[in-house]
Image (cartoon, rainbow, N blue to C red):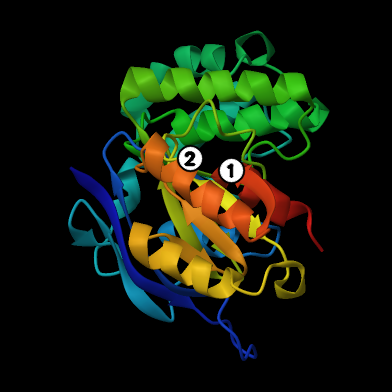
């Protein structure tokens, strides 16, 4: 069942002659946990803010359970949002949750305070103020506010930033337990695929405002980076074109992508023919290829 459908979504800010997000289209099914990955400045936060209705799009539409979120009031009642900190640092964590529920007229969720704070590891610190917290505890405070109403859809923007490896592991455990218990759909933005591997069943890769790739966690394609033309044998170009046509491969930017639907015989034939023309530079998994992009200038 579709919970979110995004159609041709775009955002161009005033005074900019370029789109921060352009022609984004995807569907999130009930129970999906989607990793939104890309470099800093790639458009991840813009996309999440549009989904959260904190910004209006220049073009395109977003549907939540079949309803256009920009044409309906109070449609985000079932959303949990952790994009920018929303807590008050001068009052206790418990008071923050109570105030949040009062402001949003959701006092029926007051009994969830203890279980939510226990989930994020803050129950023993419930009387302390976030102003005295470490960065990781502040992150967990914001997460508690996003989860307190047991939302059906959660938006998390860079929740791992500033956390040490133990903090990252703990947060992933919290999110995984929450999703499994409550069957909540999520988009989790991060620039590190490795942080999301144990959590997400799907990924969206965004670069320069454009969603470049969508794939499920089990669809770990092989990416073959090709040598420069002057390093290949003369007949390499025609050989590559033949392989692409014969096996229906993706061919872009001196890369050939082989999906996991290829059987062993086909895979060996493809690699054998590319090796015969000295075309292979590097062989990477899809995730390794994306991670390499993040480290490039």
Is residue 85 visible to the viewer in this orientation of the structure?
no
Neighbours of disc 1 within 10 Å: few (<14), some (14-19), many (20+): some
**What residue is drawn where x is 48% and y is 40%?**
220
Asked if marks 2 and 1 touch (Cβ < 8 Å), the reply is yes
Q: Would you say 164 lies left or right of 63 here?
A: right
Q: Residue farthest to the top?
A: 124
**Image disc number at residue 165:** none
Whole-number angstrom distance, CA of label 2 to CA of label 1? 7 Å
Expressed as whole percent of the image width and height from the top left, the position of residue 233 reads: 68, 68
Q: Secondary structure at mark 1?
A: helix
Residue 220, numbered label: 2
Circle 1 is placed at which residue position?
A: 287
Residue 161, placed above or below residue 180? below
- Residue 183 placement: quadrant: top left
* Nearer-the-camera pick, 78 or 169: 169
Residue 81: percent from left, percent from top: 48, 44
Quarter occupied by residue 25: bottom left
Kindly identify the residue that appears in the image at 33 percent across and 23 percent down.
182
């Amino acid at each position: 069942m579709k919970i979110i459908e995004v159609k041709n979504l775009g955002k161009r800010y005033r005074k900019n002659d370029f789109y921060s997000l352009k022609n984004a289209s995807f569907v999130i099914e009930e129970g999906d946990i989607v990793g939104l990955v890309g470099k800093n400045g790639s458009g991840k936060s813009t996309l999440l803010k549009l989904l959260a209705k904190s910004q209006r799009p220049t073009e395109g539409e977003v549907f939540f359970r079949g309803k256009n979120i920009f044409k309906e009031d109070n449609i985000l009642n079932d959303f949990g949002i952790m994009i920018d900190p929303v807590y008050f640092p001068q009052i206790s964590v418990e008071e923050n949750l109570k105030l949040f529920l009062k402001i949003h007229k959701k006092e029926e969720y007051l009994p969830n305070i203890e279980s939510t704070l226990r989930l994020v590891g803050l129950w023993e610190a419930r009387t302390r103020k976030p102003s005295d917290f470490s960065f990781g505890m502040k992150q967990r405070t914001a997460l508690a506010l996003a989860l307190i109403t047991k939302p059906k859809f959660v938006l998390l923007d860079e929740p791992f930033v500033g956390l040490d490896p133990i903090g990252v592991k703990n947060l992933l455990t919290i999110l995984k337990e929450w999703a499994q218990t409550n069957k909540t759909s999520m988009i989790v933005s991060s620039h590190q695929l490795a942080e999301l591997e144990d959590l997400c069943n799907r990924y969206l890769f965004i670069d320069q405002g454009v969603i470049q790739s969508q794939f499920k966690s089990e669809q770990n394609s092989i990416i073959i980076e090709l040598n420069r033309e002057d390093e290949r044998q003369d007949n390499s170009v025609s050989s590559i074109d033949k392989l692409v046509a014969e096996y229906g491969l993706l061919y872009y930017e001196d890369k050939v992508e082989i999906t996991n639907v290829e059987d062993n015989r086909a895979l060996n034939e493809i690699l054998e023919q590319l090796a015969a023309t000295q075309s292979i530079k590097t062989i990477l998994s899809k995730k390794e290829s994306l991670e390499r992009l993040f480290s490039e200038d």
